[in-house]
Structure formats: structure tokens, C-alpha cells
Amino acid sequence: MSFQNPAGLWLLLGIPVLIAIWLIRPQHENRRVSSSYIWRLSDRFMKRRLPITLFERWLVFVLQLLLVTCGAFLAARPVLSRENRADYLVILDASASMRTVTESGLTRYEAAAEMIRNLAKETGRGHTVTVITAGEEARTVVSESSSRKEISDALAATPCGWGTSAMSGAMTLAQLFCYEHPGAEVIVYTDQAVDEADNLTVVSLDRGEWNASLTGLSVTRDGEGGCTLEADLTSWGRDAVIAVGLSVNGRLAEAANTSCAADTPVKVSFSVPDADKIAWAALRIEPGDALDADNQIAYFPDNERPCDTLLVSEAPLYLETALRALDRGRIRLSDGPVEGDFDLVLCDGSVPDEIPAAGAVLLINPDRMPEGIEAAGVSEEAAGLVASAADSGMKEKLLRLMKLGNISVAKHISAEASDRWITVCSAGSEPVLLARTTEEGGTLAVLLFDLHDSNLPLTTDFVYLMRNLMNIAVPSLLELRLTEVGQSQRVNLSPNTASVSVTAPDGTVSLFEDGDGGTMKIVLPGVYTVEAGEEETGFFASIPKGESAPQSISSLSLIPAEGTEEETPENAESGMWRIVAAVMLILLLCEWGIWVYEQF
Amino acid sequence: MAEERLIDDGTVALLESRDLNIRSLMEGLFGGNRRSAYYGSSMEFADYRPYLPGDDPRRIDWNLYGRTDRLYLKLFTDERRQHHRIYIDGSASMGWGKPEKHRTALKIAALLGYLAVSGSDRVSWYALEKDACRRVTEAVSTRENWVLALERLEALKCGGDTKMDVSVPRCPDPGFRDGISFLISDFLTDRDWKSAVEWLLGREREVCLIRVLSPDETVPELRGKLRFRDTEAEGEDDERNFRMQIGRQRLRAYAEACLWLENDIRSFCEARRVRFFTCLTDEPAARILFDGAIRSEMIR
């Protein structure tokens, strides 16, 4: 046992002072009484003295001695030496790269878990081990355990992740732990190179195992109906000749050897003559490297879904031609009221009595304004179309691939819109294309000029605008066709699709039935199969790109808790002693109080 | 501050209707109001006896002669004057309390004396000092002399260790079968005061014990480690000076000892038809007499 504040022991000098006071002070006070006869007589009626009452004379003195001693100990802040005891905090990297297989046949994660189990063997001597895994999120899997079995079971029940490493979150938890346990030893098991580590020990699990990865898949269509699949092939750690194969719809279509310099990405590309016949295609490296999860990458074509369109116009010829050029399903013409369910409704020069709430609706040069827009006359000042400065998803969707620089408007309706409307583009300072999302989730857009008063219909941008409207009305089934573990995948339901099921690589099925779809978190790499009615497609999730390559962390540091430096050499625990001393003091006071009550 | 008078007029007035209660027939001197064991010339019929030559023929009961044809004398009780004696403990312990127990004892003694002279009796006061019994005044039989005797009583002081078993038998004029002996003390003594009472009873006198205590003697407010110094101790080494730790348990034992002592005195008195009561100094003298003395049938 040692003391953080040895000067406090000077208070022990109070003990000889106390003894001196007890020796010097008169023990008995003289008291004159009329007669001591009854006092002497009272001896006859005294109860049998308990053994403890023999100490009555000294009880107060002993209590005072103990109080002085306790006070001195408290002031000295005693600490209990725990040379054979330590708190270990283990941070275990659970990122995808930790699945790299080592020479021993174990993955890096398994090797680290084995090291922790070996560390836990010491728990029998009073050590405690806390394990935090740093996977997609930091999580404490074992808290201050001295049980080897508990630690081993917890590690066995915690598999390595497929995503990145939340090392910063783990460090935050570690910092909190260190505040509560000054002197705790922090050990980080990771395959990431740590350039600088303060107040912790880093155990590197990167033994330079060779890994090859396929990343960055892109598909380019040529003008003859074919396409080219291109990806980055990288050999990490050494030069290598790697065999890469292309399979289309599950059949090996082509294979080739590619020479790779160490750590330098090489483009590998394969051509497929008939792109429309590709249901899915995959590039795959011949197995043999340490990490298998990044050896494959797959492509699923993003086919546009049919869009039922209603065109309401007195002179629909041009608009119909433009829509048919897009070849996106059925088109119906009408010059009267809107009847039936359509994904997209275009009204040229008119406004239906009841504007459809679902899907998308475009009102072109409406003869009356929908709710929230006030017409203020007609502006005949020619001006170019300018995209709104406002940053909104609606604007991005409507103007996707459009170039407004050459488009101008000769005459348009001057109008003011309420806050519910988003200005998509303007002519001069006045809005000419407004849009908003309806309460039912549909989209309502208003074009405030006659197509005859603009050169917009004469450009390809008009076709893009129609296509964008169709994509809004019938969004793509999947937002991403190539994703990574940790990202979110949006699944869209169209009015014609009752439900969509997504089957993960491990066979778990996620069903989307309600509303307009939903979002799912990608937790496993591989091919996800998607079924939407008769349509069957999919998407591919790879491990995060950085997990394939050796990674590094510039620094990992912990701020030592206050007083840790003094305590660390003995790995001391002072808080418990303070509590014990305080409790002892309270007990003594209580005992004294009881004695005083009994006596007086 | 001048000390208050021993007896005030109001208290005396309250006693006018009271009298000492004498249970048995005493002897005494001629001229009193107390029925005696002798036949005399009072108005109270006592008995008949056959006529003898030489008897006063005026005392023959002629009615009885008519019925029995024999001469009988009609006898009446005689009334005698009693001589009461009041013994006052003058030990140092009687000087304790506020007011002092001794002063309360003097008040009681004075009032008892007044009751005595009111009943046409004589009264004497004796101060018990160490192993002596000193007469305070000559016997008093009139109220005038009683008033004069109060001055003598007020001049009495207390001190030392009274040995009642020695001093009471040394009374110069203890009397025999002629009244009541009052013994006023705190009875806080190791001495054999019971033998003194036995001696008084041996004089065939009625005996009354009055115990005077200070309130702090019944419920002492003492705490902690104390070295008792007994007022009657003779020197530092006297065994009545001793050390004691006073705590809750000791106070309980003290209360039990007080109760035991009180019961001991009471049982001793009851066994001998000795009247007894205890009073506290914080009670007025009149209340002591009207409460304790009447209840114990010392006065009526």
C-alpha cells in the first residue's frame, strides 16, 4: 500500500496529542453530593456487566484514536498496490480486411481472438478483460470479465464484420473506460498500420499476405448493341499475373491473364456483343489470394421500367412523337377529362378538374393555376432558361442531363408560388418551371409557357425532360446496382408493382410491400437477387474498397486519466479505499453516537 | 437577601382546624385535653365500679342502684396534657438543596409544634448533632412561647455526621408514654437509625418519621466520570468519597435504589405502627402537612 499524499500522514501526530490530552486531563470531575449513600446502594442494582462494558472507560478514547487514524489515512489518499492485477481493454478490429487468411490458416480476426483468449488466461490472477469490437460500429462485447470462458464465448459469438472499422468510435469507448479505470492497459488488435500510438499498445496482424482485388466496375455501351465491362484489378503487396474470367448469365464467357505490378491498379475489360441479353455479368479472379471477398464484382443492367402515359392536348402531335421516341410503354391521348390510372399525365393548355395525386403530372401553359400559384399576367420579355439556385432533389431529378444554356422563352406567365412549390428553373427572374411533391407522394410540375413560345421542344433537352418525368413517375426498381457493405439500398415500388423481395447472399429475404418501397442496409457482400413481380434482377455489394488494400491510421492516442501517471507504476486503485475509509468513518461516528445515546 | 420567615401567618391560619392525631391512650400531665388511660373528671363516661367506703357519694349512680339494689360509682375518663418531642436531624446532608432540607425540616417541626400547643399539649424540639441530642428550648405549651421558640429554631445549623442510633437515646428528657416523638431526617445514612426508632418505641411513645429530600436527590442530573464528595465525609480518604461513572444504566440503578430505600423505611414503619411520609423541599410546608401528614394520619 502506498499513499498519493504522504503529507497527510502528519495528521497521525494527532494520536500522541490525543494520548497526552487523555493523560493530562482530569479523569474524574469532583462533585459534591449531599450523601453518596444511595449511589453506593445503587451498586446492588447495577445489571451484570457485559464484557464490552469493561471497555467503556476506553471506548471513547479508542474511537477517537480510530477517527484520527482514519482522518490521516483519508488525507494521505491511500492506494492499494495491485502489482499482480490489471485492467485490460482490448480493441479488436472487425473490419472486412480482418477476414484475410493468414499462413496459419486462420483469418486475422481469428488469430487476434486467439491472442485475446491467451491474454484471458491470466484472468485467474485477478485480471479483468474488456473487449470492444470495431466493426461497422464499435461495440463492447465483454465488460470487465475475469472469466476466461465468458471471454472466449463472447469472442466466438461475435463474427468479423464485412464493412469498415469504426476505430474512432472504439477509441471513444476506450477513452471513457480509461477515465473510469486509470492505469488500464489498452491493446489494439488491427491489421491497419498505426503510425503513432500514445498510451496504448498496437498489435499488428498484417503479415503481408497477398491479396488481389477487383473494383470500380463500369459498363460502356457501344453503338452496335454491345457493351464493354471494365474493372480495376490490383495486386496488393507484390507483382502477380492474375487470371480474370467473365461470366454472363452464369456462364463463363471469357478469361484472360493480366500482369499486375504491386499496388498498381490495372484495367481489365471484356466486350459482350449483345448487351440486351445480359441479365447479369460477373468478373472474377481465380482464387488463391488471402481475401476472397473482393475477388468478384458483378453487373446487373438497369432496365428502365414501362410508364403508362396520358397526354391531354388539343394538338398532341408533337408531344406524342417525343414520348413515343422514348419507347416507355403505353401512351393514351385524350382531349377531355382524365380517367383511369396512369404513371404520367401531361396536360397541355388545360388543367384537369381533379389532378391525379399519384405518379407524375406536368401542366403545360395551364389555363388556370393549381393551388398555391397565383398568375399575375403574361410577361413578353424574352429570357433564357436558368436552373434554380436552390438545391433540391426535385430539381436534380427533373433537370438530369439537361443543358439549359441554349434554351430561351419568348413569352411566359408571370406567377408567384407559395413555399410549397419548388422553383426548378426561371426565365429572367421569374419562375417558369415549378414542381412540388403531393401529399400522396406524387409529383406535380407546372411549365408556365406555351411550348410554341420557346425553343425547348426543338432541343434534345425536351426529350430528357420527358424522360426525367417518366423516371420520376416510375423510378428505377433499385437506386444502386453496384453498392458496398455499409451503404443503404433504396428499393422503389411502382404503382404496377405489388411487392419486391430482396434475397441476400446468405439467403435472408427482405420484403417490401408498403407504400413506395423502402431502404435496406447492406451488411453482406455478394449478389443480391431482387424479384418484383415477373421481373427478376439484382445488384452486387462489394466490401468497402479500402478493405482490399493495406490501410493505415495516422495516430491512435488516449488521453491518460488524471492521476494515472502517479498510479500507473503500481497499477493502483485508490477510489475503493476512499470509499472504505469513508464508510469506516461513518460507522465509527454511528457507533460513537450509539454509545453516547446509551450513556447519556 | 433576607431569608424568608420560618412560618407565615397564612400557614398558621390553615392549621387552626387541625390537630395532632394520637392513636393510643397516653398518660401525661394533668390539665390537658387528651384522653388518657386514667379515670378522671371529664364529661366522658368510661366505666362503673362497686362503691367502696371513702368514695365520694356524689358519684354513685342512683339509677343503677334502683335497678340492681347495689351501689356503683360512675367513672369518667381523665384528660391529660401530652408532651410531644420533635427530633431534627442536623447532619451535613440536611444542609443540601434549595431550599435546604434542614430549613424544610425546621418548618415542619415548627408547624407540628404549633399543632401541639394548639391542642393544649407541650412540645419540645431536639437537634440531633453528631452523637449528641441538644434541647433547643424548654418545653413550650403556649402560643406565645411557641413564637419565641421559633427564633431558637431558626438559629439551628446543620453539619457533621449525625449518628442517630447514638444521639437519640441521649435525649435528656425523652418522656415515657406521654406523647408523640417526631423524627425528621433524610435517612441518607449508613448509621443504624432503626435502632433509634426502636429506642423511642421502647419509651412507649407513638413515633412518626418524616423524610425530607431534595428533588435532585430523587432525580439526579449527574453525568460522566465523577468523584463524589460526601458532605458528611470526614477527610479525603473517607470511604464515602469515591469515583463513579454515571451513565444511563447507573441512573436506572440509582432510581431503583431510591425506591428500595423508600420501601425499606415504609415496611419497617408499618411493622411497628410507625407513621411515615416523605416530602420534597420544593413543596410548601403547609402542603407537606396537608398532604403527607394527613395522608399518613399524623394529623387530622
Image (cartoon, coloured by chain):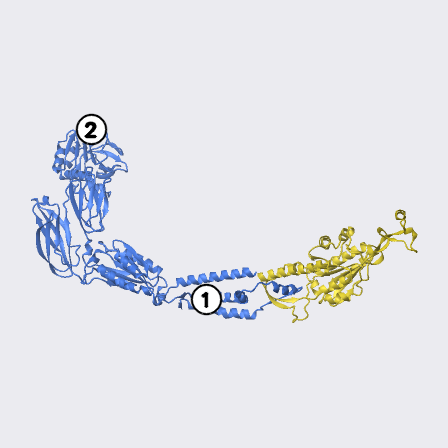
Mark 1 → mark 2, Cα distance in angstroms:
96 Å
Q: Residue A135 is drawn in which quadrant? A: bottom left
Q: Amino acid at mark 2?
A: Pro
Residue A288 is situated, as x and y percent measured from the top left of the image, at 13, 58
The residue that mark 2 highlights is: A337
Q: Residue B214 is drawn in which quadrant? A: bottom right
Q: Pointer 1 indicates a residue of which chain?
A: A
Write the residue at 13% across / 54% down: A232
Q: Residue A392 is drawn in which quadrant? A: top left
Does the image show residue A127?
yes
Residue A45 is situated, as x and y percent measured from the top left of the image, at 60, 62
Q: Closer to the camera, A552 or B95?
A: B95
- What SS does tag 1 mark? helix
Near mark 1 (Cα within 10 A), the count class, few <14, some 14-19 or many ≥20, is: many
| Foreground label between 1 and 2 | 1
Near mark 2 (Cα within 10 A), the count class, few <14, some 14-19 or many ≥20, is: few
Q: How many marks?
A: 2
Q: Pointer 2 indicates a residue of which chain?
A: A
Colour chain B is painted in: yellow
Q: Closer to the camera, B285 or B290?
A: B290
The residue that mark 1 highlights is: A72
Callout 1 and callout 2 share a chain: yes
Q: Closer to the camera, A358 or B236?
A: B236
Q: Amino acid at mark 1?
A: Ala
Task: Spot the residue most to the front.
Answer: B69
Side (left or right) of A342 relative to A67? left
Colour chain A is painted in: blue
Quarter of the image that includes the C terminus of chain A: bottom right
